[in-house]
Amino acid sequence: MTPDEQGAASDNDLGSVMSRVARQLQEEHGDTDATLQAITTAAVSVVPHVQDCGISFVIGRTTVEARAWSSDLPREVDALQNRLQQGPCLDAVWDELVVRVDDVAGDPRWPAFTVAAAAAGVGSMLASHAAIALAGAQREEGLYGRMTHRDAIGQAKGILMERYKVTADEAFGLLVRSSSVTNRKLRDIADDLASTGTLPTDRH
């Protein structure tokens, strides 16, 4: 397999993972802001080698608005794209592509942006859509439903928070990671943890 084929396979694997995460997030969250924040947590937890994640809206094809982030760096990157009117997030939305940047400093596609982003400490980037999960949250907003599943997931998060002394978002990330590794639904992982006290991945 060539490096390009390996990269394409990796992007396809990532797409599969995030599609599964998107469906799982709909079970946990019924409002847009909570879903956006959960996606950033899930991405950092599930996707290999990811250190930071941000969710942005592109408004009027020219403005990148940060809506959720795992650190200040994604917000700085959005500000750079706004100021310079170029960058991978804009291209990902405009062209409906997964935009992969293996070496920010050496990428010629956005010369002004890559210089500034590299200076800010960005080494590589991957820009794609989170629209699947967002659309699901927007459909669910204001509707009553799925409370049993959410209660189970909330109980599971509480167990992990107490056991590992982590935040609610970090506990949710552990559930998502276990779901991804075992290829089981998030609610089933939560039910298993609540009934046995053990994450499925803890048994391996």
Image (tube, rainbow, N blue to C red):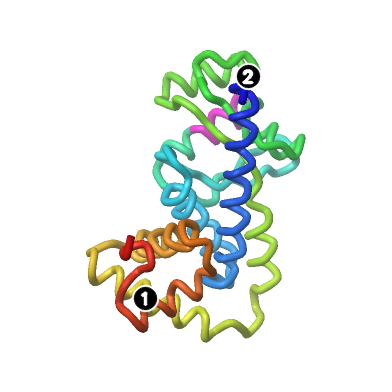
On the image, numbered disc 1 is attached to which residue? 193
Residue 176 on image: x %, y %: 46, 61
Residue 125 is marked as none
Q: Are marks 2 and 1 in contact (CB under 8 Å)?
A: no
Please, what is the dominant secondary structure of the magenta stretch? helix
Query: In the rendered structure, which amino acid carries the disc numbered 2?
Result: Trp
- Between 30 and 57, the one lying in front of the other is 30
Image quarter of residue 138: bottom right
x then y, percent, for residue 197: 30, 77
Q: Nearer the viewer, residue 22 or 35?
A: 22
Tell me what residue is drawn at x 33 percent, y 60 percent: 204
Q: Which is more foreground, mark 2 or mark 1?
A: 1
Sequence-wise first label, 2 or 1? 2
| Above or below: residue 28 compared with residue 36 | below
Direction from residue 76 to residue 19 in the image, left or right: right
- Residue 18 % position (x, y): 58, 52
| Residue stretch in magenta | 77-84
Query: Disc 2 designates what residue?
Result: 110
Q: Is residue 120 magenta?
A: no
Tell me the quadrant of the picture where the N terminus can be found.
top right
Quarter of image, res 169: bottom left
Mark 1, other Cα within 10 Å: few <14 / some 14–19 / many ≥20:
many
From the top left corner, tell me how far across and down residue 126 is, in percent: 56, 35
What amino acid is found at the position of numbered circle 1 in the picture?
A: Leu
